[in-house]
Image (cartoon, rainbow, N blue to C red):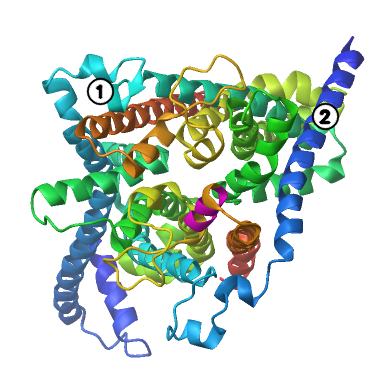
Amino acid sequence: MIKGITFLAQAFSWLAVVVTLGAIFLFLGFLGVRGLDTLNLALFFGQTSPWEAITAQLPVWHGIWPACVGTVVLVLLSSLLAIPLGLASGIYLAQYAGGSWKKWFSLAVELLAAIPSIVMGLFGFALILFLRKTLAPQANTCLLLSAACLALLVLPYLILMTQTTLEALPGELRLVGLSLGFTPWQNLVQVLLPLAGRGILSGVILAVGRAAEDTAVILLTGVVANAGLPAGILDKYEALPFHIFYLAAEARSEAELSQGFGAALILLILTGALFLGAYYLQSTLSKAWDQKKLVI
Amino acid sequence: MFQVAVIKDIFVERPGGNVALFSMKKSASRGQKLWQGREHRQTLIKGLLLGATIISCGSVLAILGFLCYFAIPIFSQGHLGEIFAWEWRPFQGRFGILPMVAGSLCLAAAAMCLAFPLALGICGFAQGLGPKRLGRPLLGLIHFMTGIPTVIYGFVSVIFLVPLVRGLFTQSSGYSWLTATLTLSLMILPTIVLVIQAQLEQVDARVRLAAAALGFSPAQTLLWVLAPLASRGFWAGAVLGFSRAIGDTIIALMVAGNAAQVPHSFLDSIRTLTAHIALVVATDSTSRAYQSIFASGLILFGLTAAVNLCLRRLQAGASGATRHD
């Protein structure tokens, strides 16, 4: 009886693993096979010469260069907004907040983390509707709005990562610094933050990856299919995930379709690299801690 | 506290041998001044950090506020019955969003039915049912899957899965509940696996030796000891996976077909609340259609918030249980 159940469970677990691995390798394999051939300079720049495209002398028509630049600018802008805010909030929650306030703040962060990305986009869209009605009748969806909404989307990741890494540090560290006369801030900057650095950095990298891949937010807040290079932060722009989304629905020729595969592969490589970086940092976290302990 | 500050000032400001030369009185008054300056700076820093926290946490209220502000006309003008109706025909003045609510629930439930058993199997495999050597690389791959952009699942599904379904079932266009379910379950799988796995590992650390001493094999430990103890982890995984499935936009928008109807078979095209928001913003511009998307947004916000509060209760219960042990 017991053996029978164990055998059935084992058979089922093997089946689950084989089905899942089969599905994932089919997906990625299909993407890899179709995408690898398209990886060349023409994928990025079309018929424009790379130098003229990078220096923005000539517009790129049949390449994903504008979408790549759009995504990079978008991610940089949203990181600029989200990282200071997220780190500061995380530090406050880990070091200063206490009692019922901490409970309420944590609840708010968890709720923020749970909000679907499309609702974040809808918030940005509502903001523009509101601005048009009241302060600025000319307001329109733009790069800055997308960056702000993406910043809200990744903010909870940053806060939680900073908070949990700081709270995971051994309690003695908090006391030793203070007992030697450090002010709480000095203790934080000189002792705790350097030790928590890797964990926080991995949180930042994950947040950047999340901002780079999200499509639903930018769909509602100003991305368009053919904007060229972003002219300013109050203008429309192109982005890599939206470009893939657009080509899946609107590709009119085989060439456009294979461009979609190329773009998808580039995005996968980008987010995959970011993800592996964060994973590596996290896995070295405990080792680094042990070495530092020896030095102290 | 104050003495600590004085001693610190001697050490920090004047390192070296002249500590003993200090007259205690002098240093005390100097230390007091410095300490007051420090106090001011500490308060300032704390204030800044608190400000950032208030902005971060207040954004939740801002989002809820904006959604409510734009959804209010539905309640005040008595359109509630029109929005909560079963027909979506914007050109004939019918703006019911209930088909989309049904679509969201159907798609999420179906994806869960597929992904949850698979996730259980994978967790079991990594935790004792499969060969020990394969467990870690498998979990590494699952971890990597969380980093794959959703739009890529959607893209590959449109090019690969949709024609496949169209070929297998001739009465379908391929853009269907079934296609979206298959794709979506692949996307939510890693979330469920990682949540359950974390719980299993936590329990395992406590009972491994006891179970081994009683003569359980790893597979038996998992089935008769770990699984019953980690039941909260199963619930948490299911709840989180469901909330991810409800919140997904891109896969539903790309492969579910987006016909605003209650599905009768797996081959029917369906539209979710999330896809509805994206479609209306892209195409419609009547004010009633806009009201319907803010109502959808509120429903989504409410659903995911409720799910999260459930999860919070689960975790609170879990930590209570550990204390009891």
- To which quarter of the image does residue B191 belong? top right
Q: Compared to A47, does B213 lie above or below?
A: above
The residue under the point 69% across, 66% down is A38
**Which residue, as the protein is rendered here, is positioned at the far left?**
A134
Left or right for B224, reference B57:
right
Q: Which of marks 1 and 2 is in front?
A: 1
Q: What stretch is highlighted in magenta?
A: A242-248
Residue A154 percent across, percent down from the top left? 41, 52
Name the residue carrying label 1: B93
Amino acid on which disc 2 is placed = Leu
Q: Does the magenta stretch include residue A244?
A: yes
Q: In this view, does A195 lie above or below B75?
A: below
Asked whether residue B183 appears in the rendered view, the answer is: yes
Q: Residue B219 carries which label?
A: none
Residue A31 among magenta residues: no
What residue is shown with label 2? A15
Q: Along the horizontal axis of the image, is B199 left or right of B23?
A: right
Mark 2 chain:
A
The answer to whether residue B50 is above or below residue A56 is above
Residue B31, quarter of the rendered image: bottom left
Give me the residue at 65% from left, 57% from top: A254
Of residues B167 and B154, the one drawn nearer to the viewer in this rendering: B167
SS at circle 2: helix
Rendering coords of residue B182 (x, y %): 65, 32
Q: Pinpoint residue A58: horizontal percent, then vertical percent.
A: 44, 83
Q: Distance between the residues labelled 1 and 2?
A: 50 Å
Q: Is residue B109 above or below residue B237?
A: above
Q: How crowded is mark 1: few (under 14 residues within 10 Å), some or many (20 or more)?
A: few
